[in-house]
Amino acid sequence: MAFKLHFTCTCTYQTFATQVAQIPMHEFKSNGIQLQLNVLFGSPLDPPPLDTRQRDSPLNSLSISATDQSLKVAGHRQARDGKPSPLIDDAGRFYKPLQDDDRGSKEVAFYSSFSSNTRVPDHVRRLFPVFHGTQLIEASDGSGLRPHLVLEDVVSSRSHPSVMDIKIGSRTWYPEASEDYIQRCFKKDRETSSLSLGFRISGLQIYGNEESRLWKPENKLVQNLSAADVKVVLKKFVSSNFPDDPNSDPDCSFAASVYGGSTGILAQLLELKAWFEDQTMYHLDSCSVLMVYEKEKLLKGERSDAEVKLIDFAHVTEGKGIIDHNFLGGLCSVIKFISEILTSPDECTTKVCLQDSDKNTNDSENCTTEGM
């Protein structure tokens, strides 16, 4: 299936006059695990110096015992391949184990840079998890102390969140990667919808009408969906009928409340798109968009609290004055799929999804596709 993305953007080129200098590495060591953080100055990915508030914060104590802090495994992002799982606490924080290689240090560098970057507007900053620093805590697998990113917990603070994790970009490898890594990523991009659509669904959980009913298909199942199946899943995500029922078509009952409106998911994605049409500081290779809402609240007549957050920044590279077309193209593709669900009468078995969507879908018209 041929697929093209068209969008209009203006590239702003920048040069970095500051010479990049490398100072000695900072190391975390525990149980044979060594994480080396290269602290670089003169780059948009530099970790900022630790200020007084950070030094005084309990988040920067030497270590935390999982028992002492009532930490528990984050259910929506389980460990893979025997690796430690992320943890959460009762204070609304998410503890992500840092990877042992340079991916861990790159993610710390990005969060440190982004959280202190005054060129990032507030309305864009809120689309990223709040960064609370790093912390040495007991790993979930009992392997000992391990450095963790401490972030805002976007999901677990909700009662029954429906969550979709979408990996953005037709290319998920980063330029500095090894040839072996690039080939593995390219194979997966080609076998999933990444190459054809510019994104792939990499994780999903949807609550049904009853609290006890949860649809959480295996990641491999949703990652290998065709373009038509991707649209079906995006419709199931905002439907009242239970998603695993093969005899019922998704009704899109909650599309207007979740995707549409001035504060819905589409509006938030369009804010992100507008920024990526201009920003040239970062290239977010293999980054994901997390979409979250609470169906139970909608069933009670309340607001859905639909929210978009960008996550997973282990492969961020410097923009060097060039727009991130890989991320922007994939984001435009997601926007097009969602706007079609909101505006096309034949997309849903109910027309509830058409209300309150005109303004946002008009704004998304310059994200177009051909050849579907």
Image (cartoon, rainbow, N blue to C red):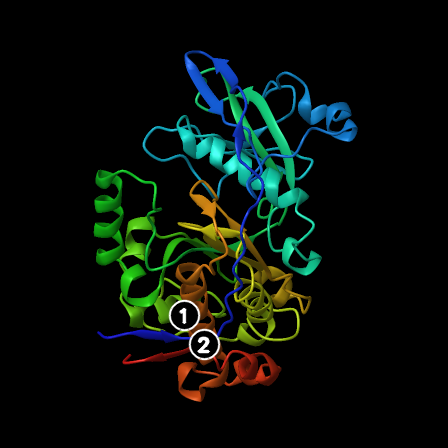
Q: Earlier in the sequence, mark 1 or mark 2?
A: 1
Residue at x 52% of width, y 75% of height: 253
Q: Residues within 10 Å of mark 2 (few under 14, many from 20)?
A: many
Residue 80: image x %, image y %?
Answer: 36, 35
Viewer-nearest residue: 85 or 269: 269
Name which quarter of the figure residue 229 lies in.
bottom left
**Can residue 130 be seen in this snapshot?**
no
Residue sticking out furthest to the top: 31
Viewer-nearest residue: 221 or 9: 9
Name which quarter of the figure residue 198 lies in.
bottom left
Q: Is residue 319 above or below residue 29?
A: below
**Can residue 58 be seen in this snapshot?**
yes
- Asked whether disc 1 touches disc 2, contact meaning CB atoms under 8 Å apart, the reply is yes
Viewer-nearest residue: 142 or 334: 334
Residue located beneath label 2 in the image: 367
Residue 202: image x %, image y %?
Answer: 37, 52
Estimate the spatial distance between the alpha carbons at disc 1 and disc 2, rounded to whole Å.
7 Å
Residue located beneath label 1 in the image: 333
Going by the numbered disc 1, the residue's amino acid type is Ser
Determine whether the residue tagged by mark 2 lies in a helix, strand or loop.
loop
